[in-house]
Image: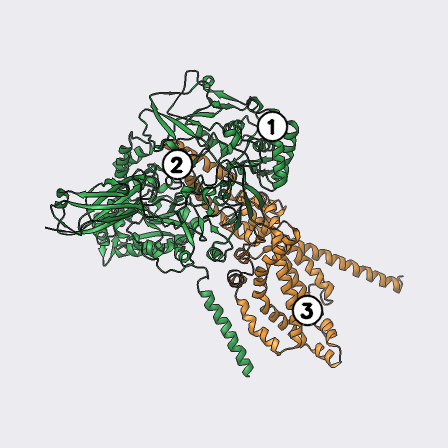
Amino acid sequence: MKQKKLFLVVSLIIVASMILAACGTTPTAAPTTPPPAETTAAPTTATTEAPTPVATQTTRHGGWFDQVVFSVVSSDSVITQLQAGAIDIYTDALASSDLPAVKDAGLAYATASGLYYDILYNPAVFTDTNVLNPFTNRKIREATNWLYDRDYLNQEIFGGGSLAKFFAITTQFPDYADLAATARGLEAYYAYNPDKAKSIIATEMEGMGATLVGDKWQYKNKPVTLIFVVRNDSDKTRIPMGDYITKQLESVGFTVTEEYKTGSEASPIWIGSQPEEGLWSLYTAAWSATVLDRNQANIFQEMYLPDSAQGIPVFLANKPDPAFQKLGDDLYNSNFSTAQQRHDMMAEALKLSLQDSLQVFLIDGKAIIPYVNGLTVTADLAAGVQGAQIWPETLRRTGEEGGTLQWGTQDLFGDPYNPIAGSNWAYDQGAIRATQSGDFMADPYTGLYHPFRIESAVVVAQTGLPITKTENWVDLQFQDTIEVPTDAWVDWDATNQVFITAGDKFPNGLTAKRMTRYIYPANLFDTVKWHDGSSFSVADVVMGSIMTFDRSKPESAIYDAQSVPVFDSFMSAFKGIRIVSTSPLTVEYYTDTFQLDAENNIPLAIGWPTYSFGEAPWDVLAIANLAEANGELAYSVDKATANANNPIEQTSFIGGPSLDILNKYLTQAANESYIPYAPTMSQYITADEAKARYANLLAWYTEHGHFWVGTGPYFLDQVFLTEKSLTLGSFSDYPDLVNRWATYGAPKIADVALDGPAQVTIGQPATFNVTVSYEGNPYPATEINTVRYLVYDATNTIIESGEASNVTDGQYTVDLSAETTAKLAAGSNKLEVAVVPNVVSVPTFTSITFVTVP
Amino acid sequence: MVTESQTAEIIKRRTRNTTLVRLARFTGLRLVALVATVVVGVYLTILIANMGGYVDQIMRNDIRERISQQVAAMNVTHPMSLEARQQLTQQLIAQDVKRLGLDTPFAVRSGRFLINALQLKLGTALNMVSDHGSRSVESIILERLPATLLLMGTSELFLFFFSVFIALILSRKYGSIWDKIVVTLSPTSAAPPWFYGIFFILIFAAVLRLLPFGGLVESPPPANTFEYALSVLKHMILPASSLIISSLFLSIYNWRTFFLIYSSEDYVDMAKAKGLAARDIERRYILRPTLPTIITNFALLVITLWTGATITETVFLWPGLGRTLYRAIGLYDTPVIVGSTIIYAYLLAITVFILDFVYALVDPRVKVGGGN
């Protein structure tokens, strides 16, 4: 009997423990304890904890590591695996709500732009006239800015790891830095103030014919009900965010019906339905910015206006202020002639966008990239680590060379690897990026381009275009007319396999808005090697140009209809390309498009053989083209599956059935010393050179078992498709020393201290000192764009803003004149300073409170 | 006049003919029923996987959202005029709509899916690719089959035979301490395998660091075949243990109870009273009559291996069919879902068909097509 009771008790204990354990959080879940308070009042300060790199002396070429091993890791166990030493870095990033767990685990981390969240309103008048849609009213939409406490959302839902967001522009992108003072003023104006929101909403609702019955708005004797579509998937943050918004809207008298839906369930409603149908009133939208965009002038049109390129019905239903419409269109079309004019237009657009508030932006999310201590990690402000072009050049174990890095990622081999239309998955591109170099290097902290393989450039722009330059490697000139030379290549004759020149196609002459001449170093062809040992040659560049055209020509043997739309878009602005010289290689590129920064006016679709999805030498493309021309493989999935009854394989350079086919054509090409596009390419390749190339490629394939060949600091060594793993090896023939980009180890975010009198007499001048430093050293004045100050009175209204005076490196003063202090009433005031460096587009804010007395 | 022997021969022939006719009729009817079941089952799968065509709408909106974002990103590096951008967006959307077959009515596509599936023409996936980069559904499924068979086969077969073996012993020792332990621990099977998996990962990978967190093999995989096999075995310990532990005690308990019922039959008591050896009693009087049930369970278990263990494979990042099917459902990749289903349906139908005959072979009481 006792035994039975004992077993009964044991059974109950086991069952109870399992139930309790099942009800608890998973062991790796992030604790929700709030993070420690930030030391400064600088909401946009990046939290990257990586140590500052020091450019070390070295003789090593290639990558910092001997080997990088990629493996797939479940995101649930990332922190545990990092702690256990199973991986060194997880590059797919965690949500900012995981930040406390990362900190508790004692791990280092970098940050990048994550999703940015907002509330998207349905602005349409509903077909059912008995239903009132309050969000047709711009003032009600605007008022909700005061209704939502962005700081609360950041602290409670995102663990304080994200940023409060008021504008469509990204908080850590250059435009925000440029507009920091304006933005700060608007943020102060639209700071959380539910009473103000309630008052405005009440006035407007009454004006629309609604009545407040009890504490609920009614229209035609029915409650004003808002259908709120809340996303319950993705990173799950939109559920608590939606609940909070619901609570706030209910607090001002609306009746809210929340509908939790996954992305797939929600899209037919907010994208697929007509806004007038009234199937929804508001939606927890989220967007992403994966490229560090230096010019977000188009975003107002895109995020608010009916002519938004997104073409979603909800945008078409918006009826913006005509002034905002015109401003948004002008900004999109670059209808400005100076940087200052653009700045002013952007500042005005910020203001008007908040008045429109088709979308009320709430949070700039941060993606957390955790890694073990002792690594130096460069994270692009937008693209993080795996999306940063610079990662292969900078990621290292601090103070060490060689060794192995264990790289964890959420998946691998999402699509076949081929450089023309292959895998575009971020995790795959993370590996591919390490195998390539290129013409330029995108600055991870400003988005500005630096010369990588090119040495210098000349940008000639049509007079009046608002292009400016920052760095000395580019020479910016203006001309009234830019003629395209008659021998420039403007198109491709796929039948005869020769370029069509400007003289042939445009006998009456052709002009362009911009020309970029980029010059490579004289020793380019001696120093740059492909991973299989072949020397880089001008033929690789010419092949790149041919591939830009050939796939989109119906007469071509490798014609692919999938490529046509993007090609047509390219051709609508392309005006020509010309190889001016092959020693040193000098190329001119003519186009009607331009970027505001001269440095970024580098051709991207033509030139260095970095194709859309990877780099490739001409010989690899030659055999892949043969396979495609013979109908055995196709670069794009569209073409591969076009014939449903007889689909073919999509070209993969790293595995699967493609390898045997490519190998077959490699053998054929080697036997024939095959020169692709011979009428053109034979001017740049001899039969012996072709033979040598194929021999190197065959040796490479024999050793590594794949055809992925690049010029980057790492080469793709081994691929394990089913096991979901790959290894990269350091490329010792890489022309650059490993420390070439070492100074980009961490963003140079300014530390700012503000000092001054605690008490100021009204009507008397006052001086405040600003100290700007980085890691204890004065921040060079040449690296500072602006130090702007804002003076707030006791009601948090800005009464003056201006530029601080530079005294010396790292030292500035803010001089408040007697007239300025005279505008202040007796009481507590605030002086805020925004420091915007040139070398990182992350401004630092700090403020000091002072008392004014008569 | 017919002799007695001739009469017997005629009766015998008639009986044989009657048996053949009965067998043929049973076989034919059974096949028709099974084919109809498969057709209905697969078409229902197609309808469910596509939410009766509603998935088309979801996919169209997903395409619009994705392409809009893609073109917006392109616009950062390749500035375009508004018209050019809108035109490009529309063209790319149209391309994707065509590629995914959304320009054909769902009713037509669903019929096409069904006919192709029944002919085992599995076609190409909409979004998924095999690890080797192929979009062929056949490749996607076959590539994952070995890993699933290895994990599921090892754990399920071990579980089956071990459970039956232990249950048989326990059925002879009803009320013993081991019997009670099994009964006590049987509720542990209420927790699914992945639940144990998480604990095992925490204990053996994170804390003790004895076994890997997941995956098929270490990264990079060993070049030597023997070391590779050892690494796979090492990686299989935790997921296989999770699958086994989560079902072990309940499985033993079930079989033990099943055997106990047969052990208490009168003819078993009679055999015991006659003094037959325990081994003979087990073999002849307990195992023999339970054989159809054991075979049925075993056959169904074998085809269940085909489905994989979705969540356990996901927790351990095991590259098996369960994860593939789960991903296909998430991506609305109908060809992969249908491909996986049709193979399972055929396997199930064939198994059920064969089992009818096997029952007749192992149990004399059963007569194929005997009916009433």
Label 2 or label 3, whichever comes before in sequence order: 2
The quadrant of the image that shows the N terminus of chain A is bottom right
The Cα–Cα distance between marks 2 and 3, rounded to whole angstroms, is 71 Å
Q: Are marks 2 and 3 in contact (CB under 8 Å)?
A: no
The Cα–Cα distance between marks 1 and 2, rounded to whole angstroms, is 37 Å
Q: Can you identify the residue that label 3 sits on?
A: B290
Residue drawn at x 63%, y 60% as measured from the top left: B154
Question: Depth check: A326 or A831 in front?
Answer: A831
Task: Tell me if residue A209 comes above or below residue B20 in the rendering.
Answer: above
Residue A222 numbered tag: none
Q: Which color was chain B given?
A: orange
Residue A221 shown left or right of residue B250 in the figure: left
Q: Quadrant of residue B158?
A: bottom right
Q: Amino acid at mark 2?
A: Val
Task: Tell me if residue A488 comes above or below residue A772 in the rendering.
Answer: above
* Image coords of residue A534 (percent x, y): 57, 32
Q: Secondary structure at mark 2?
A: helix
Q: Can you identify the residue that label 1 sits on?
A: A690
Q: Chain of mark 1?
A: A
* Image coords of residue A586 (percent x, y): 46, 25
Total marks shown come to: 3
Q: Which chain is green?
A: A
Number of residues whose C-alpha sits closer than 10 Å to that of mark 2, classed few (under 14), some (14–19) or many (20 or more): some
Q: Are marks 1 and 2 on the same chain?
A: no
* Image coords of residue A685 (percent x, y): 57, 25
Q: Quadrant of residue A618?
A: top right
* Image coords of residue A587 (percent x, y): 45, 25
Q: Can you identify the residue that label 2 sits on?
A: B76
Question: Depth check: A743 or A622 in front?
Answer: A743
